Image (spheres, rainbow, N blue to C red):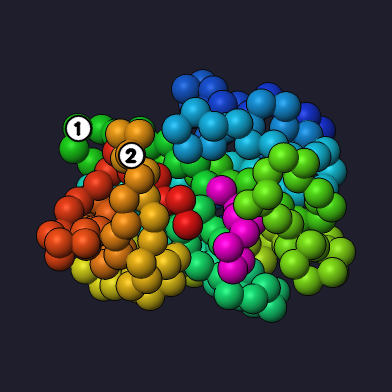
């Protein structure tokens, strides 16, 4: 993997936080990957905590700069990273892999991977991103998290973490090459693998439950939901949660 430089450390609070500090100290190069076997305070979307048993899963962060390929829309990056992980898991014969908006990776109705992307801008242009990925690989149980699963639980196979990391990085690299395509083309590809698209689903917003149908996303990453009265409404991540 000549594109990537893997920096492996035994333990850290958060690979995203440590990589961001390296960025602030001007120590990052495009393609740097910070990988740890023990992440004490892993972070997910909306300040959630990412729980991972030491040595069982992949917890790593990738630094990507945009000095050569310019990008204005961070959601397009999120789409491509998610699609990269989706393709990697499909290559490992994980069944029914989809992207739950905006960038959780599901096998069936179980979450196997979470993504947290932190973006740095110069003016209106995205200058660099830190892409944090937590993939449940060999963990055998998740306690009180019934919707979480590892690929070991799904397939019964124990995986070599180095091999899985190499596969994930290769597919992410392939998908990032699609940045030369139009945003509309990337969104269309993303919607192809969108979890529960076109299916009646239950959502929660402002403490209330309602039924709707996911119809896709717009260029800014807002979820398009068709309500029972056929009205189409756009939601951002802070306003809605998919319950099933």
Quadrant of the snapshot with the N terminus? bottom right
Residue 194 visible somewhere in the drawing: no
Name the residue rendered at 18%, 37% in the picture: 124
Question: In which image quadrant can residue 237 be found?
Answer: top left
Residue 107 visible somewhere in the drawing: yes
Q: Nearer the viewer, mark 2 or mark 1?
A: 2
Name the residue rendered at 46%, 51% in the picture: 243
Answer few, some or many: residues within 10 Å of disc 1's Cα (few below 14, many 20 plus, some between 14 and 19). Answer: few
Looking at the image, residue 69 sits to the left or right of residue 39; the answer is left
Start and end of the magenta stretch?
107-114
Could you tell me residue 142's position as x and y percent?
A: 76, 45
Considering depth in this image, is 107 or 231 the residue closer to the camera? 231
Question: In which image quadrant can residue 34 be found?
Answer: top right
Name the residue rendered at 35%, 45% in the picture: 209
Could you tell me residue 55's position as x and y percent?
A: 84, 43
Looking at the image, residue 177 sits to the left or right of residue 5; the answer is left
Q: Earlier in the sequence, mark 2 or mark 1?
A: 1
Q: CA distance from mark 2 to mark 1?
A: 38 Å
Considering depth in this image, is 6 or 130 the residue closer to the camera? 130
Considering depth in this image, is 224 or 91 the residue closer to the camera? 224
Answer few, some or many: residues within 10 Å of disc 2's Cα (few below 14, many 20 plus, some between 14 and 19). Answer: few
- Judged from the image, the secondary structure of the residue bearing numbered disc 2 is strand
Reading the image, the residue beneath label 1 is 123
Is residue 103 in the magenta section?
A: no
Q: Is residue 63 above or below residue 70?
A: above
Q: Is residue 4 above or below residue 171?
A: above
Name the residue rendered at 25%, 47% in the picture: 235
Q: In the image, which disc is placed on residue 208?
A: 2
Q: Is residue 18 above or below residue 178?
A: above
- Judged from the image, the secondary structure of the residue bearing numbered disc 1 is loop
Q: In the image, which disc is placed on residue 104?
A: none
């Amino acid at each position: 993997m000549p594109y990537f430089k893997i920096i492996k450390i035994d333990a850290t609070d958060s690979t995203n936080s440590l990589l961001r500090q390296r960025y602030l100290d001007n120590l990052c190069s495009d393609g740097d990957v910070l990988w740890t076997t023990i992440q004490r305070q892993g972070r997910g979307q909306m300040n959630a905590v990412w729980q991972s048993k030491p040595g069982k899963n992949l917890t790593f962060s990738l630094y990507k700069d945009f000095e050569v390929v310019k990008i204005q829309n961070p959601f397009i990056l999120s789409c491509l990273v998610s699609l990269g992980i989706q393709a990697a898991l499909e290559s490992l014969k994980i069944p029914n892999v989809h992207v739950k908006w905006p960038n959780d990776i599901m096998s069936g109705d179980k979450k196997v991977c979470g993504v947290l992307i932190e973006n740095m801008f110069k003016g209106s242009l995205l200058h660099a991103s830190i892409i944090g990925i937590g993939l449940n690989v060999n963990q055998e149980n998740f306690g009180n998290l019934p919707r979480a699963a590892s690929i070991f639980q799904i397939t019964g196979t124990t995986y070599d973490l180095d091999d899985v990391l190499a596969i994930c990085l290769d597919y992410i690299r392939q998908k990032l090459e699609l940045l030369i395509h139009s945003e509309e083309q990337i969104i269309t590809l993303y919607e192809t693998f969108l979890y529960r698209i076109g299916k009646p689903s239950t959502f929660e917003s402002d403490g209330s439950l309602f039924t709707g149908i996911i119809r896709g996303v717009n260029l800014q990453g807002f979820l398009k939901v068709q309500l029972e009265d056929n009205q189409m409404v756009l939601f951002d991540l802070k306003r809605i949660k998919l319950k099933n």
